[in-house]
Image (cartoon, rainbow, N blue to C red):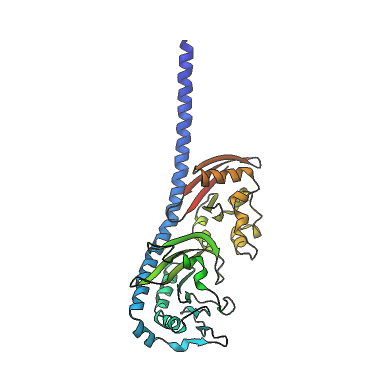
Amino acid sequence: MKYSFFLLIVLLIISFGCNSEGRFDNDAEFELLDSIIKTVEVELIPLQNEIERLAVFSSQLYASEDSLVSKANKEKFISDKAGWFRTANETRDESTVFVSLMASDWDTSINEVYLTEPLDREFKRIVEKHPMVAQVYYNSRNQLSRLFPPYDLVNTIAPDIDVTAFNFFYLGNEANNPMKKHLWIDEIYIDPAGRGWIMSIIHPVYYESDFKGVLGMDITLSDLMRYFLAKFEQNLVIIDKNGTIVAGSNSAIEALSMPPLKNHTYVQTILADNFRKEDFNLFRSKSKEVRQMAAKFLLEKENVFVFQLEGYAYRAYCRKMDLVNWYLLNLQH
């Protein structure tokens, strides 16, 4: 009986020591993920402040419509043979601007081109101040589009494009954004202006409670990876709420049994013309264990998953980000 008692004490001590060590290791891993997320979000938070200030500035332009329209340089624009109103020549310091043929009130749309001309100066300032911002733009409900830096409009955009049909516009309207605040679009999408796969922050523009349009700033996935994940020597992966890989180290993506990477890099893969984001969804991995991990993290909201993959033992840690509805994973083996 005496020996049984001492044996029980020893087992409890060993068990407590192992559990304490496990908790300590997990705490350290989560502290690492939290620090990485903080590093990312410290860079993103200023963009929220920028777009809020830009929304106030844009609203004030509508209050000075008459004077701004009269002072605008109207010679910069043409109406081509198809009747498409757009910038005549691209310059490095000015936005590419057009009014879609979908516009119903042509005079109002063209006046909006003139009154929003001061936005070019602000757009350029933001792009120069924040290198991760690929482009800044304003799309109005009157089918005006203004985007900086300029791009090859004629060979990129169809004259009858509906600028209000894209998520970077309609997610900011009155129905989808009743709080009239900034909004991160965390579901990656193809940029119609040719910048590839991007994420965006948008903000509606109102004047006297009247919805005018939506401002946006874009970050390309390649820039996101270059600015953030490349700084850390970890097997890191960022996934969205649906399990699609947004960014990640090449070694981590390969370990998750995803399709082969173009030139062995994820950046080259997402820039390829045949890239399909659904192919890089964890729920579509060839590995049953990876699919189970995705379910544990995204559906059951767990944050540690241990599994075997191709003869290797893995321990995956997961932390949800704060600003966007994404998850940061760290794979260890």
Is 180 left or right of 227, judged from the image as shown?
A: left
Picture coordinates of residue 60, whole percent (x, y): 33, 75
Task: For residue 40, say whether it is visible.
Answer: yes
x, y percent for residue 117 = 41, 80
Give the residue drawn at x 43%, y 61%. 183
Visible residue check, residue 133: no
- Picture layout, residue 4 above or below residue 26: above
Question: Which residue shows up at 45% across the image and 36% down it?
Answer: 23
Q: Position of residue 72 (x, y in %)?
A: 40, 86
Q: Residue furthest top?
A: 1
Residue 166: x, y in percent?
Answer: 51, 68
Give the camera-side residue of 311 and 53. Answer: 53
Quadrant housing the C terminus? top right
Answer above or below: position of 217 versus 90.
above
Quick one: which residue is furthest to the bottom in this view?
Answer: 75
Q: How many marks?
A: 0
Residue occupying the point 63% across, 49% down: 285
In the image, residue 132 above or below residue 62: above
